[in-house]
Image (spheres, rainbow, N blue to C red):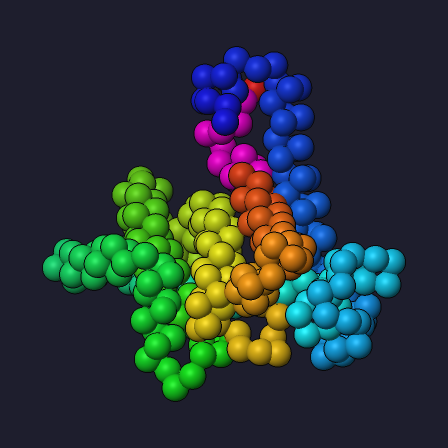
């Protein structure tokens, strides 16, 4: 990875080219999965439940990624997995953003005693790995489902978002223009809307993108353990789990969902890096 000093030493044209490449590559990788996910709403190469392809057939013109152990088209399963991954990522980040930003703002405006209490509670939650916390929340439910996985991951993400929001909001509230705004009669809700949120949003949006990738990986891990989306949902984690017994005879069953998972996570991280370059003025060089 290029260091801060190495980036600063690059000519402005090369810096802009590198940033553009990162952003556009991220958009391209994520865009592939978005297109596949949207396509599954209206069309798939084969019916997801069709078992007429023959067991563990190799890739061919009829079945681009072969078939699984039940004779279902594997490329169709990968496409549906893209839709589930995006549902999980968007749903978990949305839940985490609503809860986390709300708690973070309350902590930033709270009294010192309440602020310290909330900060300690958030540190305790963050100390638990996201996957472990999500597993505990899912286990409290009656049965594993896609909705319970999204809710569990959203709650786990909310602690990280709340802590970051609290830190950023308190930093903004210490600025002189906040005092001037209060002196002019602006209410605290108005200050949050006009000053706090616009100033912390670029950093939060990058964090949301990173949390999206973590949520996708966590959901795949939950599904691998049998705590995620149940059949017939074709989660990439469940596809990897089912491919365990046939990894030597039909390796495509493990390779394809693995590649899909890696490309989506890398794409989201590249997109987040590109957004950080755009949203953080301290990273901009002479243009």
* 272 vs 163: above or below: above
Q: From the viewer's perspective, is residue 279 above or below residue 236?
A: above
Identified at 76% across, 78% down, the residue is 50
Where is residue 90 drawn, in percent x and y?
55, 63
Spot the residue most to the left.
113
Q: Residue furthest right?
A: 61
The residue located at (32%, 80%) in the rendering is: 140
Left or right placement of residue 277 versus residue 116 in this view: right
| Observer-nearest of 168 and 238 | 238
Query: Height in image: 52 above or below 159?
Result: below
In the rendered view, does 184 fall on the left or right side of 71? left
Q: Residue at x 65, y 57 (%)?
A: 249
Residue 176 seen in the figure: yes
Q: In the rendering, at what x and y percent does residue 276 appear? A: 51, 39
Compare residues 258 and 71 and report the one nearer the observer: 71
Q: Which residues are magenta?
A: 274-285
How many numbered marks, from 0 up?
0
Quadrant in the picture for residue 105: bottom left
The structure residue drawn at horizontal position 80% and vertical position 77%, both measured from the top left corner, is 52
Residue 163: percent from the left, percent from the top?
30, 53
Asked whether residue 98 is in view, the answer is no
The rendered magenta stretch, by its main secondary structure, is classed as helix
Give the percent coordinates (x, y) of residue 209.
51, 51
Residue placed most toward the observer, 237 or 191 = 237
Q: Residue furthest bottom?
A: 142
Q: Is residue 279 magenta?
A: yes
Specify the quadrant that holds the C terminus.
top right
Task: Tell whether position 252 is magenta.
Answer: no
Q: Is residue 98 left or right of residue 234?
A: left
């Amino acid at each position: 990875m290029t260091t801060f000093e190495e980036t600063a030493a690059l000519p402005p044209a090369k810096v802009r080219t590198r940033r553009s490449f990162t952003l556009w590559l991220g958009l391209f990788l994520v865009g592939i999965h978005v297109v596949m996910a949207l396509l599954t709403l209206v069309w798939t190469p084969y019916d997801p439940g069709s078992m007429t392809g023959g067991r563990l057939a190799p890739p061919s013109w009829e079945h681009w990624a072969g078939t699984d152990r039940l004779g279902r088209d594997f490329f169709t399963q990968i496409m549906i997995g893209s839709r589930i991954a995006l549902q999980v990522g968007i749903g978990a980040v949305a839940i985490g953003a609503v809860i986390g930003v709300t708690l973070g703002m309350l902590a930033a405006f709270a009294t010192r005693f309440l602020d310290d209490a909330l900060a300690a509670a958030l540190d305790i939650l963050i100390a638990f790995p996201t996957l472990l916390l999500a597993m505990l929340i899912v286990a409290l439910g009656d049965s594993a489902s896609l909705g319970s996985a999204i809710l569990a991951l959203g709650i786990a993400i909310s602690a990280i978002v709340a802590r970051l929001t609290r830190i950023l909001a308190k930093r903004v509230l210490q600025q002189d223009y906040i005092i001037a705004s209060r002196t002019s009669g602006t209410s605290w809700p108005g200050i949050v809307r006009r000053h706090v949120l616009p100033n912390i949003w670029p950093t939060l949006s990058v964090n949301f993108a990173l949390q999206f990738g973590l949520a996708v990986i966590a959901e795949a891990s939950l599904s691998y353990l049998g705590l995620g989306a149940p059949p017939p949902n074709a989660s990439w984690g469940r596809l990897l789990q089912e491919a365990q017994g046939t990894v030597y005879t039909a390796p495509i069953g493990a390779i394809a969902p693995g590649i899909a998972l890696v490309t989506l996570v890398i794409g989201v991280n590249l997109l987040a890096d590109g957004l950080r370059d755009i949203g953080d003025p301290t990273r901009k060089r002479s243009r």
